[in-house]
Amino acid sequence: MNESLPIWDIHSEITDTLAVRNRLVLAAPTGSGKSTQVPQIILDDVLCGGSKVVVLQPRRVAARSLARRVAWERSAKLGDEVGYQVRFENHTGPETKIEFITEGVLLRRLQDDPRLANVGAVLFDEFHERNLMSDLALGLVKNLQRTGRTDLKLVVMSATIETGPIARYLGQADDDPCRMLASDGRTFPVEIRFGKYRNRDPITEQAAGAVEQIIRDNSPGDILIFMAGMGEIRGTISAIGHRRLPEPVELIPLHGDLPPADQDRAFGGSDRRKIVVATNVAETSVTIDGIRHVIDSGMARVARFDAERGFGTLLIEEISRASADQRAGRAGRTAPGTCHRLWTESGHLNRPGHNTPEIHRTDLSESVLMLHAAGIDEATQFDWLDKPDANAVAKAE
């Protein structure tokens, strides 16, 4: 464990709360250590009787990297005391006590083992992303607590979450909200640089130009570039490759569809300056050592579903201000850095403050089927954090 991290300043508040309550909302910004330290605190100082801690991560790359980090901190072999399970990968064993998993894994486990035997705590990390499957899993775990597993601990953690609504949702009554705790973060200063005007050049060329400027300014450190998807990543790598840069660089793609070994390249060392070109998989929970500069396209691929016409689309849309802040924070994890936003400051103010929860924009069919499998026939009556549109539910059923 790393007791120098800010989350340890509220160690006693975490343990004291979970000693008398079974729910907790924790707001902890970048650098606080929540993702690596809270699972260990709960395992060592809250649980008893050999039960395990399950940590829900919205992204596979985060589940893998966090499991490796926590295993290293505990001087354990990955897959023994600490492990992870994501689609097509299971690095856990009979002795695993801290398990990092994705939402789909937890939902399948709830179908096979509705009481979550041997699980003492479920932690929902980076909940601000508001994935549909996270919302569904949260409601099911809350229902499990209410229908028999009163001993099960439920912790919701996020760097940017608006804690009021989630605390009321997890409260025992309207006048008795769930306990909320806040931790400081630990980041170095990040200088934000906006575009001076609306640039008509392709976003890939804009990013390549920003890379060239950073290198010609002799600014030390590796570079992380955020792009919307794989096509934009390939285009950016190609655009940088055609620039006559004054020093050799290592160009590394990072996205969720890469094999684990290729994803690991982003986290390894290099004798050249690394330029990691990533989707939003690198936005939260993962730290790439050496990153001092972020170049942000300000875009992401977002799934949307038209319930009236019955089809879904994957659109490239502007990210929220909260997501932009998360991306900028990647430049300040280990040293002072810079964030180059490829949009104007006035345009930034017109962006939404937070992400739209997936439940309001994606197809609900899979979620409705999972509820039916859990014996819940009326999806509209399920205890959602945010109620879905009744028409969208009707179409899904």
Image (cartoon, rainbow, N blue to C red):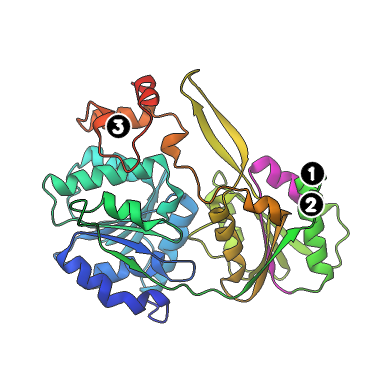
Please give the range of residues in magenta.
220-237
Give the SS element for disc 2: helix
Tell me, yes or no, whether the two marked residues, 3 and 2, touch with CB atoms within 8 Å. Answer: no
Quadrant (top left, top right, bottom left, bottom right) of the N terminus: bottom left
Depth check: give the residue in front, 121 or 79: 121
**Amino acid at dot 3:** Met
Q: Is residue 225 magenta?
A: yes
Tag 2 or tag 3, which sits nearer the N-term? 2
C-alpha separation, residue under disc 1 versus residue under disc 2: 6 Å
Question: What is the x, y in percent for residue 78?
Answer: 39, 63
The label number, if any, that marks residue 370 in the structure image: 3
Residue 264 vertical position relative to residue 355 in the rendered view, above or below: below
Residue 46 vertical position relative to residue 322 in the rendered view, above or below: below
Q: Which residue is mark 1?
A: 202
Tell me, yes or no, whether the two marked residues, 1 and 2, touch with CB atoms within 8 Å. Answer: yes
Q: Tag 3: Cα neighbours inside 10 Å, few (<14), some, or many (≥20)?
A: some
Residue 242 vertical position relative to residue 136 in the rendered view, above or below: below
**Amino acid at dot 1:** Pro
Quadrant (top left, top right, bottom left, bottom right) of the C terminus: top left
**Amino acid at dot 2:** Gln
Tag 3 or tag 1, which sits nearer the N-term? 1
Question: What is the x, y in percent for residue 385?
Answer: 32, 43
Give the SS element for disc 3: helix
Q: Is residue 226 magenta?
A: yes
Residue shown at the point (54%, 73%) measured from the top left: 187
> Among all residues in the image, which is located at the extreme right?
244
Question: What is the x, y in percent for residue 125?
Answer: 39, 56
Depth check: give the residue in front, 354 or 108: 354
The label number, if any, that marks residue 206 in the structure image: 2
Residue 47 placement: quadrant: bottom left
Looking at the rendered image, the disc whose residue lies closer to the viewer, 3 or 2, is: 2
